Each structure stands twice: as C-alpha cells, then as structure tokens.
C-alpha cells in the first residue's frame, strides 16, 4: 500500500511539473496575432524574400499621411514609442518573416547570428551612383568599449541567451567611412530586441551628416508559427544641408536590408 502511494505521488508530481512547463512555455504566436488586419499587399511583402520596407518623415506621420505598422500592434508601446519619442526627421520601417520549420530555430540561433559581427564584412548592396554591387561595410569588428577602439574577436557561439548585453562595433561604411555603433540586445516579451545607435558622428568628407545619437535602429525578433518574425523601426535626424540633397530613407533602408540579410544568413547557416 505504501509503495503504491509512493508511486502515485511521483506520477502526480511529474504531471504537475509537466503542466507547469507547458503553461510557462506556451505556444508560438501567429503573424496575424502580432500584426492584425494588415493590408493584403503589405502582408504578402512581409512573407516575400525581400520583405516590406517603407520610409517616411515624422511630419507626414503626424499629419496622418503615412502610417506606422507597429502602431496598434502588440509591439507598439515599447518599440514604436521609443523611436517616435526621439523626434527623428525620417522613419524607416521593415517587416519580414523568414520561413523555418517549427521547433528547429530558437532565439539562441538569432542571438548567435547577431553576435557574429565579422559576418557583416563585405556584404553587398546595389549602388545606384556606381550602377553595380559593392560592399556596404568594407570591414566590421567589435571594439573593447566606446572609449577603446582596440578590435576584439567575436566570441564562440553561446549556449544561452543573456538577459541583456551591450557591445561596441566599428563598421567601415562605403559612404561614411569608419562608423561607431553601440549595439544593445535584450530579451523583450516573447522575443529579442536589438537596438543599434551611433555614438559618434557619421561623416562624409569630414562633414557631420548624422550627429552622435541621431540614428537609432531597432530590430525585434520573435519565433512565430510561420517562422522568424523580424520587425524593424529606425529613426534618423540628418543635418539640414544633406537632408535636401540625399535620399535618407533609401540610404537607411539599404543598411537595414544588409543588416537583416546578415542576421537571416547567420540563422540559416550558423558557424
């Protein structure tokens, strides 16, 4: 009798732990749960190979002439408000779903892809002025800190995702030369938030184009039922002299496309 009670207690305990585990883990959300009621053409673009990209000015958004998809979604308050709250002149939004088999990809894969800074080196984009594909970032490396420019290697693949992390990056940009960024990664809701901001001026021919802290790009990653969701929202304030002479939306979109493709390739083809 005592033996039966013992085994009954063990089985009951195991069932309780299983129930708790299932409750905590939950199920992946669907794309439509996060972005409900999207126009069909935008949804189709998000699931295409190139994804959805849109650029506008803050003035047009406030006037109601342009919309931000993230508004009204479950990502609204923290991600959208963070960008719009900085009052940037230009806004670039992106949305992409990378198909993958359920259960084969995790946030750890995303984190390790984001950690491979060297993987940004030599990634190509189409230059309209040169009418050919050229490397956007001729070199990419981690730095010791924002005050120490010594290059350091990327770490080996991690076995767990830290709750938060800040790293410093130098990108040798085809247009801006050496560019210095602070990259912050943190667990956020059901996913992983990646925030990139310049901690030094971005210059062209020694003239400041984007001053320190005036470029912030946020990418949110979540494993959903359809694959991996990547939602991006970026804000940038450009010096008046260049704002009227350069297509800022296109320039930021190209950089986002390269960064997103770097992450996507890193997820699909880990080191």
Image (spheres, rainbow, N blue to C red):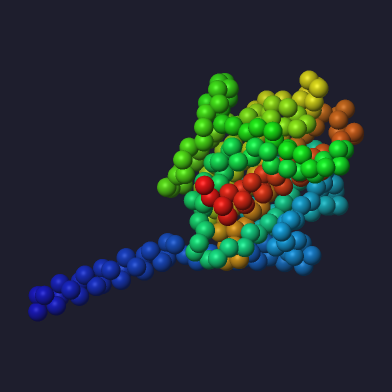
Res. 252 in view: no
| Horizontal and vertical percent position of residue 77 | 64, 50
- The residue that appears at 56% across and 59% down in the rendered structure is 223
- Residue 191, compared with residue 146, is above or below; it is below
Res. 2 in view: yes
Seen from this angle, which residue lies furthest left?
A: 1
| Left or right: 35, with 55 as reference point | left
Q: Quadrant of residue 89?
A: top right
- Residue 56, compared with residue 88, is above or below; it is below
- The residue that appears at 74% across and 49% down in the rendered structure is 93
| Horizontal and vertical percent position of residue 226 | 61, 66
- The residue that appears at 63% across and 33% down in the rendered structure is 140
Compare residues 126 and 8 and report the one nearer the observer.
126
Seen from this angle, which residue lies furthest right?
A: 245
| Horizontal and vertical percent position of residue 267 | 57, 52
- The residue that appears at 69% across and 42% down in the rendered structure is 123
Q: Quadrant of residue 254?
A: top right
| Horizontal and vertical percent position of residue 56 | 82, 46
Q: Quadrant of residue 91?
A: top right
| Left or right: 245, with 109 as reference point | right
Quarter of the figure that contains the N terminus = bottom left
Q: How many marks?
A: 0
| Left or right: 75, with 9 as reference point | right
């Amino acid at each position: 009798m005592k033996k039966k009670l013992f085994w009954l207690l063990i089985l009951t305990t195991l069932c309780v732990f299983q129930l708790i585990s299932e409750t905590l883990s939950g199920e992946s959300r669907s794309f439509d749960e996060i972005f409900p009621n999207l126009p069909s053409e935008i949804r189709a673009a998000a699931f295409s190979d190139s994804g959805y990209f849109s650029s506008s000015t803050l003035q047009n958004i406030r006037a109601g002439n342009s919309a931000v998809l993230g508004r009204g979604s479950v990502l609204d308050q923290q991600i959208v408000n963070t960008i719009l709250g900085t009052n940037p002149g230009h806004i670039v939004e992106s949305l992409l779903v990378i198909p993958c088999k359920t259960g084969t990809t995790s946030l750890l894969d995303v984190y390790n892809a984001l950690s491979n800074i060297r993987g940004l080196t030599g990634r190509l984009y189409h230059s309209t002025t040169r009418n050919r594909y050229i490397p956007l970032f001729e070199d990419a490396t981690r730095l010791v800190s924002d005050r120490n420019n010594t290059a350091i290697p990327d770490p080996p693949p991690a076995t767990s995702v830290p709750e938060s992390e800040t790293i410093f990056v130098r990108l040798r940009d085809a247009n801006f030369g050496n560019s210095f960024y602070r990259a912050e990664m943190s667990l956020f809701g059901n996913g992983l938030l990646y925030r990139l901001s310049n901690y030094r001026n971005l210059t062209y021919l020694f003239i400041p184009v984007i001053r320190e802290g005036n470029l912030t790009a946020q990418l949110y990653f979540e494993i959903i039922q359809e694959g991996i969701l990547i939602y991006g929202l970026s804000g940038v304030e450009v010096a008046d002299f260049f704002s009227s002479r350069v297509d800022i939306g296109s320039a930021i979109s190209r950089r986002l496309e390269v960064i997103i493709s770097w992450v996507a390739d890193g997820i699909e083809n880990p080191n």
